[in-house]
Amino acid sequence: MNQQLTLGIWRGMWNASQFLDLYLGELKGNGVQSYRRVFPRAKYQSAKASASRLLWKPGVQQMLKRKLEKMEGVEKS
């Protein structure tokens, strides 16, 4: 049971990372399309709500901040 919980948390963070990569990159801030790319079975309205909830999670906000800082560092180089 404990191992499944750990795998579930890891999978959730991997999905969030994929979502943010799309959100910040190719899909340029489109949360709905980013969410639907990671979760292709999601309907539009579900993806809209879920993307918003995902962006409000503290762990995702920290990950977003790190990715933005990394992008700024690359742009300055």
Image (cartoon, grey):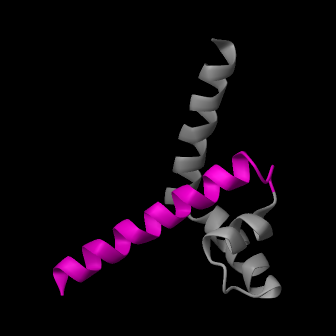
Residue plotted at (35% across, 66% down) = 10
Location of residue 25 (image quadrant): top right
Image check: 47 left or right of 11? right
Q: In this orientation, which residue lies closer to the viewer: 44 or 51?
A: 44
Residue plotted at (79% across, 54% down) = 27
* Majority secondary structure in the magenta region: helix
The location of residue 76, given as percent across then percent down, is 67, 14
Residue 53 among those drawn in magenta: no
Tell me if residue 55 comes above or below residue 2 in the rendering. above
Residue range in magenta is 1-29
The location of residue 29, given as percent across then percent down, is 80, 53
The location of residue 21, given as percent across then percent down, is 62, 50
**Which image quarter holds the C terminus?**
top right
Tell me if residue 41 comes above or below residue 23 in the rendering. below
**Which image quarter holds the N terminus?**
bottom left
Q: Residue pushed farthest left? A: 2
Image check: 16 left or right of 36? left
Residue plotted at (29% across, 73% down) = 7
Q: Residue pushed farthest top? A: 77
Residue 6 among those drawn in magenta: yes
The location of residue 75, given as percent across then percent down, is 69, 20
Residue plotted at (60% across, 47% down) = 64
Location of residue 9 (image quadrant): bottom left
Tell me if residue 77 comes above or below residue 37 in the rendering. above
